[in-house]
Structure formats: C-alpha cells, structure tokens
Image (cartoon, coloured by chain):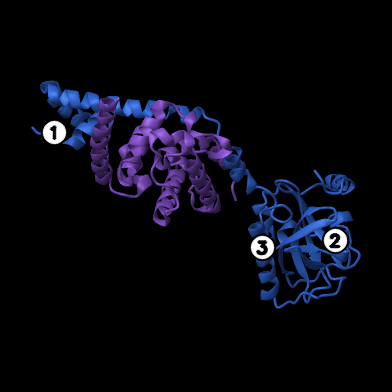
Chain colours: A blue, B purple
Amino acid sequence: MSVTDEDLSAYADGMLDAEASARVAAAVAADPVLAERVARMRRQAATLNAAFAEVIAAPAPHRLEAVVLAERRPTAWSSPLRGRVAAIAAAMLLAFAAGWSMRSEVAGPVAVSDGALMARGALLRALDHQVAGEPGRGDVAITLSVQSETGFCRAFEVRSGLDAPAIGLACGHAGEWAVVALTEAPDQPTPEKGYAMARGAIPDSILQAADQRRAGDPLSLEAEREAIARGWKR
Amino acid sequence: MATDAVRQDLIRLIPRLRRFALALTGTYADADDLVQDALERALARLHQWRPGTRLDSWVYRIAQNAWRDQLRRGRTRGVALPLDDADEQPGSDGRTDAEASLQLREALHALAQLPWEQRIVITLIQIEGYTYPEAAAILDVPEGTVTSRLVRGRAALERLMLERERAT
C-alpha cells in the first residue's frame, strides 16, 4: 500500500483521523526510509516553531495597541478627521434629506466649525445647563442624557432656528458639543411645557447614534445636575 | 462599533499577529506595518465578524489579504535581507533585527526564499499551529491545496536548511 507525501506530512502533523493514521503508522513502522522522513519533518517543524518563539515575547510597538484603542475616542471632538467628516456628512445628509437648509445667522442652533457640526446659541446653552425634561428656554428641550464611552451625549429637540423642528444627538462637554445625528422631529403635538419625552418617542436613528457610542442607561436627574456642575467632564 | 471585549481580544492577538507578519515579510519594520494595516482593516469591518466564530482566524484572513495586496503593489521589500545585512535594517521603535536571534534570522532567511503560497502555508501550520482545515479557511482555498503547498514548502525548506548546514 502506497503512502503519499501528503499522507506523511499529515501524519507527522497529527492531522489524520484514527483510521488513516493507523494505516500510515503501519507503513512507517515497516519502512525505515519513511520513518526517517517523518522524523525530519517533525524536527524541521519544531525548529521553525522554536525559532519564532522569541517574537511572542518581544515587546510590540505601542502604535499597534494604539490603533485598536484609537477608534474608541468619541466621534466629534478628538476622533481622526475621517471619522469627524463621516459624522458631519451623515448629519448634513439627514438635514438635507429633510429639506432643510442651515440658517447662517450667528444665533442659529448649529454651525460648522473645524469640520464638525457644532451646537451654538440656545442649543449650546441648553446642552450645557439644562436638565433633561426641563421646559426649555429658546425652544430647545433636552430629552435624554447618557454616558458614552468617553464622555456624555445628550439628545435634544430644537423647535426653531432650523427649517423644521429637529431631534438630534450631541456629544461632548460644556461649551463644545458636536451634533453627531440630526433628524426631523416626529410630527406630533409637543406639550406646551415639560418636554419630558419618553425614550420611546426618540427616533430610532438618534437612539442608534447613541448606541454606537456605547451609551449607557439614561442619567438620573441627580447625575445630570452633577454633570452640569462639572461641565460635563468625566 | 468595537466592544471593549473585542478590542481586548484584538490587543491580545498582537504578539501572534506580529509573529505571523514577521514570517511573511521578513523584517520587524514590515511586520509592524502589516499588523497595523490588518488591525485597521479589521476594525473598519468589524461588523462583518460573526460573534461566536473565531476572531483570530478572521483577523489572520484579513492580514494575509493585506499582505497579498502589499505584494501586488510591490510595497514590501518582499524578501528578508541577506543574513549578513540583517543588522542594518532598523525596525520600528528603533529596534534592529540584529535583536533577532541567529536561529530566527536563519529561519526568516529560509522562509523568504519560498514562493509566497508555500511560505504562508508553512507559517500558518508550523509556526502558528493552525490545522489544515483552519489554514484552508484562512486562505480561502481547498484543503488539498493547503496540503500540496505544505508538502512542497517542507521539501524546499529541507533543502535550504541542509545547504545552510553544509555552508557553515
């Protein structure tokens, strides 16, 4: 019975099933030439494997670990430029899809700055100081605050300053909130005061944007007040 | 979006990925570039990885694709430097490959002389310890192809190592 090179290789590596292995073992036992070839194959594999063992122990450059960790930075204020541009592009697309144009007045709720869509004016003030559910001044309501991977994100509703009422998600800290998602507010009557909005009423696209930032459970009122006092820094 | 657990798994894979990449590229500098390329690709398409399947096989598959792309573009040196010049080659972090033991440099030198198909099969199975079916899945080729490349690679390595022994 002939034994191929492939058989010998697989036998030497222990890759054969019991039956095939027994067959090759019998042939190897009967033929010193085959036995020598198997021994050389195993020796060579062991030599090669041993030669590379030191690579595992060698310290890897920090930049490799940094590559894995880099992506976790929040999108808006410290992520690589391409992430920032992608977030803006997505937000702008949503805005344009809804038929809006960004008003250029200084007082508008958002402005493009350094490649990011940043909260301005009444929206910025609300993000900085307003507790979720609190009736807003300047037609801005905060609906939800969550802790993200490295900071905070707050869902908001803007009733004026854009061409249509909008719901969005801003991530950042006091004075610097990047709008990472923006969508048209659902066409439903909003209570005259007390914007307190159930999480269920927040559009999926906004919740998804929050989930992408590994948002945790919504902050309690107490936690929000504490975060406001600390300027939304962790 | 990468979860913390997946990130930790990727970080734990780095030493093994470097070993794989070093065997393919022949120098620490090219190996680290390849690992970085592979990690970036893996993170960018992490949504394609199915939890419950092996992350390491998936990343190795990405790494070997990245290496083959580099070969096609002629971006790597492709072949390890001759042994005598190896200590001239600075790696990342100022490391020089002179830090590699003579045993490792000899192995790299021998591997570098194999056709890439044989080099990668030998590396996956004999250095990285994958089974034949696992190597076939990583390379996306039939298992028979893996076996025949392995046999040819083994024979070629055997000759190279014998030559080396005679020369010294």
Q: On the image, numbered disc 1 is attached to which residue? A: A3
Residue appearing at x 34%, y 33% in the figure: B126
In the rendered structure, the residue with mark 2 lies on which chain?
Answer: A
Q: On the image, numbered disc 2 is attached to which residue? A: A124
Q: Do discs 3 and 1 share a chain?
A: yes
Q: In which quarter of the image is the N terminus of chain A?
A: top left
Distance from the alpha carbon under mark 3 to that under mark 1: 61 Å
Sequence-first disc among 1 and 2: 1
Estimate how packed mark 3 is, as few (under 14), some (14 to 19) or many (20 or more) residues with alpha carbons within 10 Å: some
Distance from the alpha carbon under mark 2 to that under mark 3: 21 Å
Q: Which of A187 and B86 is in front in this view?
A: B86
Sequence-first disc among 3 and 1: 1
Q: Vertical placement of A181 versus B138: above or below?
A: below
Left or right side of A61 for A19: left
Q: On the image, numbered disc 3 is attached to which residue? A: A85
Q: What residue type is labelled 2?
A: Leu
Q: Which of A206 and B72 is in front in this view?
A: B72
Estimate how packed mark 2 is, as few (under 14), some (14 to 19) or many (20 or more) residues with alpha carbons within 10 Å: many
Distance from the alpha carbon under mark 1 to that under mark 2: 77 Å
Q: What residue type is labelled 3?
A: Val
Residue A13: x %, y % from top left: 28, 30
Mark 2, mark 3: which one is toward the viewer? 3
Residue appearing at x 49%, y 53% in the figure: B48
Residue A232: x %, y % from top left: 83, 48
